Image (tube, grey):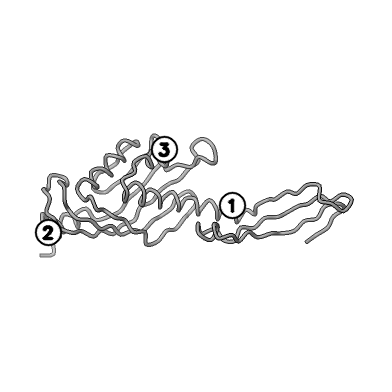
């Protein structure tokens, strides 16, 4: 704590459970209070740069998590409209580059039609600037046609990594996914369905 004329400055830390839950813990502020006649007349809270970066990283992780849990796992495609920019570009090794929210929705629908019980589990997340990397595992049962392959009833397990670039599109509080890169083994999926070999046999 430091006193300067009628101003008192100190550092405060917020440690509420909500910050712990989102992975930003604790949050530090520099607090400046103006005191006149023994009473606080005004108080200003200035968040530390490190805490701002920590909150942004936590926000990026939350966006990536919502894409997998709400859009992919639950089939809530309104999440795509909310979290993806209108001209978003999605790079997928098995489907090429697709552009726009409608194309992202079609991709999700394709997988959820073929694997209605599709479930993604997030195993790890890391943030570097505007990009959040999410390592995941997905499981499902082949109950609908997938890329011309009739339902086999087989269970599949996939592992992969998806990178989401999250950018403030218009205002700072409106952060959306402008570009994505997914890395997973499309051939491995076909091998599990029994319609391809991995070349080792």
| First of labels 2, 1 by sequence position | 1
The mark tally for this picture is 3
Quadrant hosting residue 148? top left
Q: Image check: 177 left or right of 151?
A: right
Which residue in the structure is indicated by mark 3? Answer: 85
The circle drawn on residue 197 is: 2
Helix, strand or loop at label 3? It is strand
Give the distance between the C-alpha atoms of the residues marked 2 and 1, in whole angstroms.
Answer: 49 Å
| First of labels 3, 2 by sequence position | 3
Q: Quadrant of the N terminus?
A: bottom right
Q: Image check: 30 left or right of 39?
A: left
Which residue appears at 75% of the width and 49% of the height? 43
Q: Position of residue 3 (x, y in %)?
A: 83, 58
Give the distance between the C-alpha atoms of the residues marked 1 and 3, in whole angstroms.
Answer: 23 Å
Q: Quadrant of the C terminus?
A: bottom left
Give the distance between the C-alpha atoms of the residues marked 3 and 2, in whole angstroms.
Answer: 38 Å
Q: Position of residue 10 (x, y in %)?
A: 75, 58
Quadrant hosting residue 126? bottom left
Which residue in the structure is indicated by mark 1? Answer: 52
- The mark closer to the camera, 2 or 1, is 1
Q: Position of residue 159 (x, y in %)?
A: 28, 59
Quadrant hosting residue 101? top left
């Amino acid at each position: 704590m430091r006193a300067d004329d009628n101003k008192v400055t100190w550092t405060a830390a917020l440690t509420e459970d909500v910050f712990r839950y989102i992975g930003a813990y604790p949050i530090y502020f520099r607090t400046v209070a103006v005191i006149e006649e023994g009473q606080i007349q005004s108080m200003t809270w200035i968040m530390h740069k490190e805490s701002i970066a920590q909150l942004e990283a936590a926000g990026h992780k939350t966006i990536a998590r919502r894409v997998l849990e709400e859009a992919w796992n639950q089939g809530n495609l309104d999440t795509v409209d909310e979290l993806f920019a209108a001209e978003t570009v999605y790079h997928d090794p098995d489907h090429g580059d697709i552009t726009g929210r409608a194309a992202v929705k079609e991709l999700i629908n394709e997988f959820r039609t073929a694997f209605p019980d599709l479930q993604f589990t997030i195993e790890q997340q890391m943030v570097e600037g505007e990009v959040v990397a999410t390592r995941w595992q997905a499981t499902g049962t082949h109950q609908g046609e997938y890329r011309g392959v009739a339902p086999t009833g087989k269970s599949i397990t996939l592992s992969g990594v998806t990178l989401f670039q999250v950018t403030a599109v218009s205002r700072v509080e409106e952060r959306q996914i402008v570009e994505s890169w997914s890395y997973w083994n499309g051939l491995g999926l076909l091998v599990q369905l029994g319609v391809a070999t991995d070349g080792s046999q």
